[in-house]
Amino acid sequence: MKKIMSSWHVGVAAEAYAAALFARCGYDVSVQYGANQPEYDIIVVNGNQMLKISVKGSQDGGWGLTQKYKKVNCTYHEATAKWLSAHHKGTIFCLVQFIDVAITDMPRVYLATPDEIAERLNASAVGRGETILYENHVWSKQAVGYGTIDKIPDTWRFSKERVQELLLKFGV
């Protein structure tokens, strides 16, 4: 598969799409620009409620989230636990996927909490765990997860209702 954007371009495009979607839902959006942002990339505000959003873009069907925590003699579940402890419970992840999306079409976008992502990562590959959160991955014959499909839950799909649900539960 030929990647058409650099990782930097994926990040910039993902943040722009995320900001646009929240704005289209009627939320005030504040975008942080620059390298090494703390925990979140954009803030979404509705009245007195606010959500911190960490945007992750991908053009290959998955988001590598816990690789830096997966060391020698460390299980996938331990790597996920370390990743989870490094994130605030109130930060919401906005996952933007560009694979198989025409340049003029909207990418697929999902919203998930760190706990939801950790649960999905731990269940991946028939419970062995994984460092990559897959949008829709069919495990091959040679893989531990052979015969199964790892897929992001439909309930994570971006919608105004999903944003409102997360804002009510995690908004500050």
Image (tube, rainbow, N blue to C red):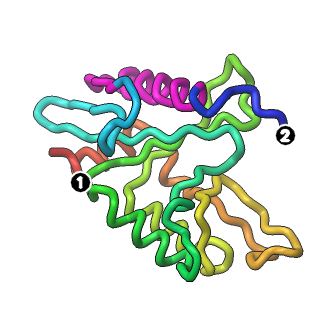
Dominant secondary structure of the magenta stretch? helix
Q: Residue 162 in the image: x percent, y percent?
A: 39, 45
Side of 20 where 137 appears, left or right: right
**Residue at which label 1 appears:** 169
Residue lying at the far top of the rendered structure: 104
Q: What residue type is labelled 2?
A: Met
The residue sitting at 83% across, 34% down in the picture is 2
The residue sitting at 50% across, 41% down in the picture is 56
Side of 50 where 6 appears, left or right: right
Q: Which amino acid does label 1 sit on?
A: Lys
The quadrant of the picture occupied by the C terminus is top left
- Magenta residues span 9-32
Whole-Å distance between the Cαs marked 1 and 2?
Answer: 39 Å
Q: Which of 138 and 13 is in front in this view?
A: 13
Q: How many marks?
A: 2
Which sits earlier in the primary sequence, circle 1 or circle 2?
2
- Secondary structure state at the residue bearing disc 1: helix
Q: Residue 144 in the image: x percent, y percent?
A: 76, 79
- Secondary structure state at the residue bearing disc 2: loop
Q: Residue 67 in the image: x percent, y percent?
A: 56, 61
Q: Nearer the viewer, residue 88 or 136?
A: 88
**Residue at which label 2 appears:** 1
Side of 117 where 146 appears, left or right: right
Q: Does the magenta stretch include residue 31?
A: yes
Residue lying at the far right of the rendered structure: 141
